[in-house]
């Protein structure tokens, strides 16, 4: 039997970052939104753990490890250990989420693998346990399970759904060269110095805009504290942001730790127009909408 689970990419509508903690993590106050770029993860029983990755469209999968360091295998092992079962699986990933782009594709795969193996092996893991295992795997993994729009605190792993009555349209502009999340946080520490306090900025204005789908207030409230450090490491990305706005987007927002840029569009039509202009300019560009569902089964076969 094969179970296929689909998990979405995430973007951060607000990413407030506080001073680095003693354990090396940064406290976050973030608002995630799940958007319509997906990885589909299929699992079936096997004598050994294995993972294979197929690109969807022109996603570059060269940076995805195919050994035990792949987060999907780590997720599978963790779930098996948690239940004390000695089972293994073959994992196939159809990857539609840009790799190392700040859209948490690896986290989506981890979340999808947890749900898929839970179903394949009929483990009936409780939601609380699933969220706990997800948090062990990475700060963004619990959100990939719940999807929608949610506030993340702690290091991003404590997730609470928030009211979001809008349908938001994004033009997603991936970059050919990935940006390592760790190096962006190091640059943040360097830039912030002693000016940043332990409490990250709260998303109050954004939450108010989401609750009534106020486009102007929403556009004005988007915030990413990792934008300055990411642009310090990659000054060339400023040109991408300029192109996104010149192509007609309302505003440009760096996705998480980058290098992917997001253009906010008023509706689907405008998003498609902006995408066309950016492609004519020589960029890769995709259209995505949010919020969408978290990891969910799409096929039993
Ligand atoms: P982060 O979640 O750290 O913000 P990201 O969203 O920028 O990361 P990902 O696509 O999740 O980027 O990948 C980050 C790195 O994780 C990759 O460069 C790759 O080395 C490693 N990795 C491990 N497993 C996977 C996986 N299943 N898919 C993608 N990358 C993976």
Image (cartoon, rainbow, N blue to C red):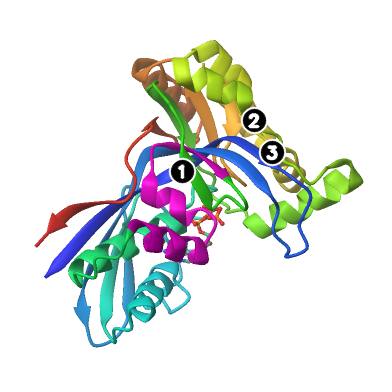
Residue at the (41%, 39%) spot, across then down? 34
Q: Secondary structure at mark 3?
A: helix
Q: Is mark 3 within 8 Å of ligand 1?
A: no
Q: Is residue 126 left or right of residue 238?
A: left
Q: Give yes or no for contact between labels 2 and 1 (Cβ–Cβ under 8 Å).
A: no
Q: Is residue 275 magenta?
A: no
Q: Position of residue 150 (x, y in %)?
A: 47, 38
Q: Position of residue 258 (x, y in %)?
A: 60, 45
Q: Which residue is mark 1?
A: 10
Q: CA distance from mark 3 to mark 2?
A: 9 Å
Q: Residues within 10 Å of mark 2 (few under 14, many from 20)?
A: many
Residue at the (38%, 61%) spot, across then down? 130
Q: Which residue is mark 2?
A: 223
Q: Is residue 97 visible?
A: no
Q: Residue furthest left?
A: 301
Q: Is residue 190 visible?
A: yes
Name the mark nearer the viewer: 3 or 1: 1
Q: Residues within 10 Å of mark 1 (few under 14, many from 20)?
A: many
The stretch of residues the image draws in magenta is: 127-152
Q: Main secondary structure of the magenta part?
A: helix
Q: CA distance from mark 3 to mark 1?
A: 16 Å
Q: Which residue is mark 3?
A: 227
Q: Is residue 295 left or right of residue 60?
A: left
Q: Residues within 10 Å of mark 3 (few under 14, many from 20)?
A: some
Q: Secondary structure at mark 1?
A: strand
- 226, 166: nearer the viewer: 166
Q: Could you tell which of marks 2 and 1 lies nearer the N-terminus?
A: 1
Q: Give yes or no for contact between labels 3 and 2 (Cβ–Cβ under 8 Å).
A: no
């Amino acid at each position: 039997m094969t179970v296929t689970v689909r998990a979405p990419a995430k973007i951060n509508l607000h990413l407030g970052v506080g001073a680095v903690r003693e354990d090396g993590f940064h406290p976050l106050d973030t608002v995630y939104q799940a958007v319509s770029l997906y990885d589909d993860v299929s699992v079936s029983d096997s004598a050994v753990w294995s993972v294979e990755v197929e690109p969807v469209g022109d996603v570059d999968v060269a940076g995805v490890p195919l050994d035990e360091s792949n987060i999907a295998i780590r997720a599978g092992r963790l779930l098996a250990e948690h239940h004390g079962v000695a089972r293994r699986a073959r994992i196939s990933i159809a990857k539609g989420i840009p790799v190392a782009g700040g859209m948490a594709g690896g986290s989506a795969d981890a979340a999808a693998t947890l749900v898929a193996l839970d179903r394949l092996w009929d483990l009936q893991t409780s939601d609380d346990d699933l969220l706990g295992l997800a948090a062990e795997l990475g700060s963004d993994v619990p959100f990939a399970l719940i999807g929608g729009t949610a506030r993340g605190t702690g290091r991003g792993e404590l997730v609470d759904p928030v009211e979001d009555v809008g349908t938001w349209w994004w033009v997603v502009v991936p970059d050919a060269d990935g940006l390592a999340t760790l190096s962006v946080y190091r640059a943040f520490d360097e830039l912030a110095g002693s000016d940043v306090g332990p409490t990250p900025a709260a998303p109050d204005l954004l939450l108010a805009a989401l609750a009534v789908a106020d486009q102007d207030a929403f556009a004005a409230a988007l915030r990413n504290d990792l934008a300055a450090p990411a642009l310090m490491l990659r000054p060339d990305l400023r040109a991408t942001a300029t192109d996104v706005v010149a192509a007609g987007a309302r505003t440009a927002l760096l996705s998480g730790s980058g290098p992917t840029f997001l253009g906010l569009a008023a509706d689907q039509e405008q998003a498609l127009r902006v995408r066309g202009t950016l492609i004519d300019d020589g960029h890769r560009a995709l259209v995505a909408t949010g919020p969408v569902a978290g990891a969910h089964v799409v096929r039993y076969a």
